[in-house]
Image: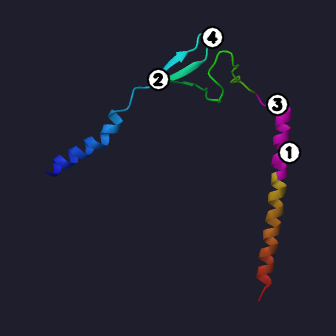
């Protein structure tokens, strides 16, 4: 009896997974050459990983994007400013600890 209930429960839980449709098919518009996902009767535009539409007319971002000297200088300045800010916070905390240690 218990085995029957367990088997019935497992089948009940697995039913939604078995009822799922297959992966959506794709359709390419011959005019725009955009790729659409076709789910049932609806079409939805497919997007690339970078968020741009998957169309031949939309330029792709080059995968070999490099960091420029100005980018590196900006990053270095930001890191140095962050270090100064952290140093200021550290000094403030040390002053507070010192003041708390002096109280009777």
Q: Position of residue 90 (x, y in %)?
A: 79, 64
Residue, disc 3 = 68
Could you tell whether 30 is left or right of 12 in the image? right
Tag 4 near tag 1, CB within 8 Å: no
89 to 102, vertically: above or below: above
Q: Residue furthest left?
A: 1
Q: Please tell me which residue lies in front, 97 or 39.
A: 39
Q: Quadrant of residue 91?
A: bottom right
The 10 Å Cα crowd at callout 3, few under 14, some 14 to 19, many 20 or more, is few
Queried whether the magenta region covers residue 80, the answer comes back as yes
Element under label 3?
loop
Could you tell whether 54 is left or right of 77 in the image? left
Indicate the quadrant containing the C terminus: top left, top right, bottom left or bottom right.
Answer: bottom right
- Mark 2 or 1, nearer chain start: 2
Gap between marks 2 and 1 measured at Cα: 54 Å
- Mark 3 or 4, nearer chain start: 4
Per the rendered image, the range of residues in magenta is 66-81
Of tags 2 and 1, which is closer to the observer?
Answer: 2
Residue, disc 2 = 41
Gap between marks 4 and 1 measured at Cα: 48 Å
Q: Position of residue 95 (x, y in %)?
A: 82, 73
Element under label 4?
loop
Tag 2 near tag 3, CB within 8 Å: no
Query: Overall secondary structure of the magenta stretch?
Result: helix
């Amino acid at each position: 009896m218990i085995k029957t209930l367990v088997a019935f429960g497992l089948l009940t839980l697995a039913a939604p997974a078995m009822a799922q449709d297959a992966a959506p098919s794709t359709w390419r518009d011959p005019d725009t050459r955009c790729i659409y996902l076709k789910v049932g009767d609806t079409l939805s535009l497919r997007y690339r990983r970078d968020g741009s539409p998957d169309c031949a007319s939309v330029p792709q971002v080059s995968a070999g994007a490099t960091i420029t000297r100005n980018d590196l200088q900006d990053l270095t300045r930001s890191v140095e400013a962050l270090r100064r800010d952290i140093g200021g916070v550290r000094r403030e905390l040390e002053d507070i600890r010192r003041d708390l240690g002096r109280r009777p």
